[in-house]
Image (cartoon, rainbow, N blue to C red):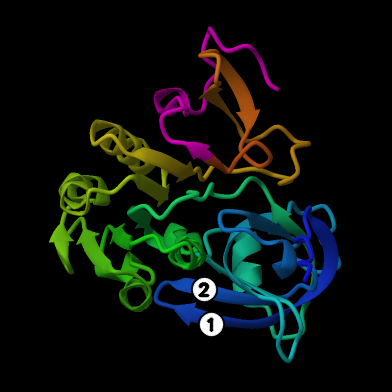
Amino acid sequence: MTTAAPETGAVQVVGEVLSVKRSGRYHHLTLVAPGVPERFRPGTFVAVTVGGAMAETTLRRALPVHRVRATGAYGGTVECVFEATDAGTRWLAAAAPGTPVDVVGPLGRPFALPKEPVTCVLVGHGCASAPLFSLAERLRERDCPVHMLLGAETEAGLFGALEARRATRGVTVATADGSVGLRGGVVDALPDLLTRTGADVVYAAGPADVLHGVALAAETHGAWSQTAVDVPHGCGTGLCLTCVLPVVGEDGGTRMVRACTEGPVFRGDRVRWRDLGGVPADARGAS
């Protein structure tokens, strides 16, 4: 018996909005995007047009993928979770079912998966946690015990806490104001969780300060970390160079790389977190 090789590479398709639902203060978007689910791997993202047919010059919005479904009544679908913070995402949040959108994806490098069953901790802040749920599914398929740590400033900012309880071995919640779960941030709660679980790998998604703290905590506990950086980018394909960041390579030298093509997932100990937004003097230039 032979097994078909998975399809790879991004595709550009004319899709449409299937639904947009509120999920707390976030929006849960489902797009019909044939061809994308078959190529999807956790950690990748899609770039979608916004603004309608008369807004051709508006930049696309890069949306991390929450889940995909390759088959169903509408064919291949892609689910994304986002917060409406600008004109483009507000347009997307208000889009009616059937609204056409041009979709490119999946883009970027995904999370690397362990070859052996190892204990994993997944750390997410706010709606940036969304891509971690499909990752948890892939890890469980490899018999990895999965624990999840979710955080936000307040209870209203949490995403997926109930879903996480059904999908993982254990869930820890932390909020800065203590409105639910532990009081404090996920970085505060992570060392104890790593000690209790003896985790070998930490995966994280969230703002840069959270990812920096996660990477340091993982390194202190002898764990390997994978971080999905949230750096604004205009095109999502590596052309505009608006998402470059300094990363240490295998040879120890720093290079400026593009988060949309060389990332968005990087080893946490390789990103020069304190130098984000600038170009270190010893960087060897954009790759």
Residue 270 located within the stretch drawn in magenta: yes
Horizontal side of 7 relative to 250 (left or right) equals right
Residue numbers of the magenta segment = 266-287
Q: Is residue 233 above or below residue 103?
A: above
Q: Amino acid at mark 1?
A: Lys
Question: Which is the main secondary structure of the residues drawn in magenta?
Answer: loop
Secondary structure state at the residue bearing disc 1:
strand
- Tag shown at residue 27: 2
Residue contact between numbered discs 2 and 1, judged by CB atoms under 8 Å = yes
Residue beneath the point at 34% across and 70% down? 168
Asked if residue 143 shows in the view, the reply is yes
On-image quarter of the N terminus: bottom right
Residue beneath the point at 62% across and 58% down? 41
Q: Is residue 168 above or below residue 5?
A: below
> Is 159 in front, or is 97?
159
Q: Quadrant of residue 245?
A: top right
Q: Is residue 272 above or below residue 109?
A: above
Please tell me which of labels 2 and 1 falls first in the chain: 1
Residue beneath the point at 40% across and 40% down? 225
Horizontal side of 109 relative to 216 (left or right) equals right
> Is 70 in front, or is 281?
70
- Residue 171's x, y, as percent? 26, 67
Extreme residue in the top direction:
282
Can you identify the residue that label 1 sits on?
21
Q: Amino acid at mark 2?
A: His
